[in-house]
Amino acid sequence: MSTAILKPLPRWADVVLLPLLNLLLAFIVSGLVVLAIGQDPLAALNAITTGAFGNGYNIGYTLYYSTNFIFTGLAVAVAAHAGLFNIGGNGQAYIAGLGVILVALPMQFLPWWVTFPVAVVAGAAVGGFWGFIPGWLQAKRGSHVVITTIMFNFIAAAIMVYMVVNVLKPPGVLAPESAMIAAEGRMPKLGTFIPWFRNTDVNFTLILALLCLVGAYILIWHTRFGFAMRALGHNPTATRYAGMSNSRIIMIVMTMSGALAGMVAVNQVVGVQYRLVLDYVADAGFVGIAVALMGRNHPIGILLAALLFGALYQGGNELQYVIPGLSKEMVVVIQALVILFTGAMEGLFRPGLQRIFTTLSPGQKDEAVARNTVKSES
Amino acid sequence: MDLALILSTLDATIRLSTPLLLACLAGLYSERAGVFDIGLEGKMLAAAFAAAAVAAVSGNVWLGLLAGIAVSITTAALQGAAAITLKGNQLIAGVAINMLAVGLTTFLGIQWFAQGGRTPQLKAGERFTEIQLPFSAELSGVPVLGPIYADLISGHNLLVYIAVIAVPITWWVLYRTRFGLRLRAVGENPKAVDTAGISVILLRYQAVLITGLLCGFAGAFFSIAQGSGFGNNMTAGKGFIALAALIFAKWKPVPAMFTCLLFGFLDALQIRLQGAEVFGIGVPVQAIQALPYILTVVLLAGFIGKAVGPKAGGVAYSKER
């Protein structure tokens, strides 16, 4: 190769520096957009930060958004480890609401701590099923999982409109929504126990999200199956020769991914709304893509990225009240740029960084040259 | 159903198929060259906004169309830079483009026009109006054929006819020109094209820019032809139906037209059936809405026929290893 001999980035640069550089670039570009329309980007950033972390109320809502994003981020990440791109988090999270409401309504007079685990299982089952079908189609019929999951997002939306409007909506109610869960069966929000959060939407599902993070870590790096799925992600041919069933791994991974996305429905239906409404997912599935990319598919990274995006969403909500004219869609722009820079424009910073690191460490440069020479001579 | 009702449904079919067809052909160029494009929706949305905004401010529909096309091509170039030059993940690039379009159009719309993200209502000279083909009025008296000519073939706006003409042009370009042969080759086996001394990168950029051009027409159709102004997220997932149509048509231009007409017909039917009881039983409108997606999944899974995309699709080309 005629270009400079580059060695791979040190791990900390790959995991921390690169995502931060990309995030910084996303913020700078968004800032330029704000500047271009004649507003002050720093004031906007200040408003977003205050709106996200200013007091217990703000933090409560930030954590509520983060809860959703942890689930969808994990859903994308688990699939990504197996080399699958699950773009259907939206549909899986949406359709899971059916399972949740169908168990929550009959159980509404039972104590919430009985209903909650059942709702989790139901949401996981339905969301998982919605992930399983594309997984099955990929594994057994060879259809591309990305296209299938996109189609399944739209199919889910159609089913949900039909179910809510024609089946779940009680007679006499005008708004397209299901019946409310009875007051005595509702899960209290965290504000009931920690007054600091006041009446915000953050609820016990946050704890479930944290448990899922730990569970995902153990699954991916400390189980036989986790090894198999990571091996599949790296080299499908190798796993097949090693005697693993690739199609079985694909189906299980997509089911798990869908089940994780389905937990958004638990947060929204049992934790916040106490009923099934239309479009409650609000594109959390797509935010999950940004979260997983930023978080480098690692639970700790996902936690931090979910907090970041939770803060951006909550801060974005407050932004329009502080600076009239700046709407919360600013956050969608930032998020899109993060996906663009971290996901699709990896090549923007990586070669430059590699060059810097290779030049800055002469010993390592010799080593890299030596290794490269060996490779080209053999 | 009487003739008038059939005609009006078919008329709606043509109107609803037009943006699908333009976007579908747009996707065809890019995917045939080996660049997966799930960002059709975003490019259309950006074009729709730019077209409506410029048409409203300048008062000129042509400037609006040009702006829509320019923005769409710029967006396509950005996507191309990520997917071709930087060898990034093409699917993620598409997702980012879609999201960027949703965010920026709403954000700028609210800021510039202060109407909750909508652009001002367009007046007569600021949008494409129906074109009456010659003799349509005179011939409308002729039984059956007259109304078909006057209502169905005549009386659409310019972009509809552009979409129709784009089909044979695309067919000709793809199968009868040197560029088309190379385009198809680069999507199947870029190495062979490279070995023949033709630039893979350049070809793919050309394809992606044509995609941008056609998405520009499709987006402009929404805001300055069919509608009279831009509304939030007004493309409403049509880019994904176009993508479905592209797969359904197995990446071929003429089948693409028929698929888009079919999907457009389903859409027209669904609007017609809204709230109506058909055949004694209420067919859920949502079932018809979901049909294009279901058909695509079924086809892709090989249950009816088999859709196999360009072999080199989705992979950035690296010259040397």
Image (cartoon, coloured by chain):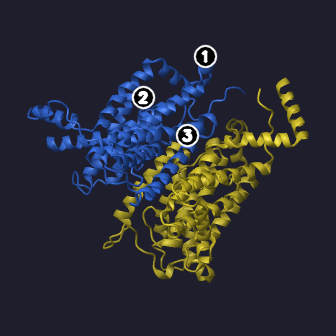
Chain colours: A yellow, B blue
Q: Earlier in the sequence, mark 1 or mark 3?
A: 3
Amino acid of disc 2: Lys
Q: Earlier in the sequence, mark 2 or mark 1?
A: 1
Q: Earlier in the sequence, mark 2 or mark 3?
A: 3
Identify the chain of the residue marked 2, using the numbered disc in the image.
Answer: B
Do discs 2 and 1 share a chain?
Answer: yes
Identify the chain of the residue marked 1, using the numbered disc in the image.
Answer: B
At 45% across and 55% down in the image, what residue appears?
B106
User: How many residues crowd mark 3 within 10 Å: few (<14), some (14–19), many (20+)?
Assistant: many
Q: Is B291 in front, or is A39?
A: A39
Amino acid of disc 1: Ala
- Residue on which disc 1 sits: B196
Secondary structure of the residue carrying tag 3 is helix
State the CA–CA distance, disc 1 to disc 3. 26 Å
Q: Position of residue B186 (x, y in %)?
A: 56, 25
Q: Position of residue B31 (x, y in %)?
A: 50, 33
- Residue on which disc 3 sits: B79
State the CA–CA distance, disc 2 to disc 3. 23 Å
The mark lying in front, picked from 1 and 3, is 3
State the CA–CA distance, disc 2 to disc 1. 25 Å
At 86% across and 32% down in the image, what residue appears?
A369
Horizontal side of B143 relative to B319 (left or right) equals left
Q: Is residue B84 above or below residue A113?
A: above
The number of numbered discs placed on residues in the rendered structure image is 3
Q: Can residue A77 be seen at all in this image of the molecule?
A: no
- Residue on which disc 2 sits: B252
Q: Position of residue A250 (x, y in %)?
A: 61, 46
Horizontal side of A74 relative to B183 (left or right) equals right
Q: Is residue A266 above or below residue A82?
A: below
At 58% across and 58% down in the image, what residue appears?
A72
